[in-house]
Amino acid sequence: MEKETDEIISRPGEMDSRQLNEFIRNMIHRIIVHHVLWFREVQHQRGFDQAMEIMDKAWDKTWDISLRRFASMGLPVSNHMPKIIDDLPNEKKLAIIDGLAKNWLAQDGVFFQEVEKLYGMNDAKRCNDSTWNYFSLVEALEIKKLLGLPEHPGLEGLEKALNFRLYGRLNVQSCRREEGALIFEMNRCRVQHARKAKGLPDYPCKSAGLVEYGRFAEGIDDRIKTTCIACPPDQHPEEWSCAWKFFI
């Protein structure tokens, strides 16, 4: 007699613990995708500036709703954060920030690789550069809001903001002033360092970098202009992998 197939689950209450874990993970993913799709559609219908304004308001309200939901489930809230996080010492909070930054970079790399596997390097780079065109500006505006920077914070504001990028917690970077300009050097790039350790050549990231740094500076202060000093595949000295010049 053939073995009967597993009974089809018709409602969440019939799931076992492992299946419920997967359901939770799946729902979190759907919520993230839904958030992104809402932003992209508002941008399409009303433009980028309006989409950013609406997203900021929607996110603040969504976070408040989520905290109230946590509290109703018996998860205490403190200082606009789940209490389990708020109670952590600062070094633990910085560790969480570092972990989030690493997860972000891993996500970025995995997305690139999946596109590359199916459609090749050229399409992967096109998708990557287009993504940076939007993400760099969004990140700049989010950091500007976080730090309470004025509309035109100048090169001083840009120098501060560069430390709060997701990359700022992953790489070793430095800034210096030179003839009224801000010189930014990526002294240890996590991606390029990993490739070098494997005996691989630099990843040619200049096309993305031109978009990434230019858009970020523009988001902090629309008067700032950006030029590339060198970025792979350009030749560069051992002490940095890429360098950029910002000026007004």
Image (tube, helix red, strand yellow):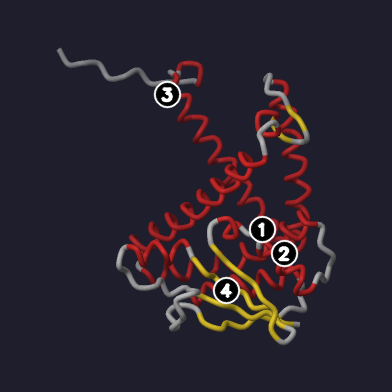
Q: Residue furthest bottom?
A: 179
Residue 142 in the image: above or below residue 60: below
The amino acid type found where label 4 is placed reads Glu
**Amino acid tagged 3:** Arg
Residue located beneath label 3 in the image = 18
Q: Secondary structure at mark 4?
A: strand
Up/down of 240 relative to 248, above or below: above
Q: Residues within 10 Å of mark 1 (few under 14, many from 20)?
A: some
Give the image quarter of residue 72: top right
> Which labelled disc corresponds to residue 164?
1
Q: Alpha-carbon neighbours of circle 3 within 10 Å: few (<14), some, or many (≥20)? A: few
CB of mark 3 within 8 Å of CB of mark 2?
A: no
What residue do we see at 62% from left, 74% from top? Answer: 184
Q: Which mark is residue 202?
A: none
Which element is circle 2 on? Answer: helix
Disc nearer the start of the sequence (4/2):
2
Residue identifier under label 2 = 160
Among numbered discs 3 and 1, the one appearing first in the sequence: 3
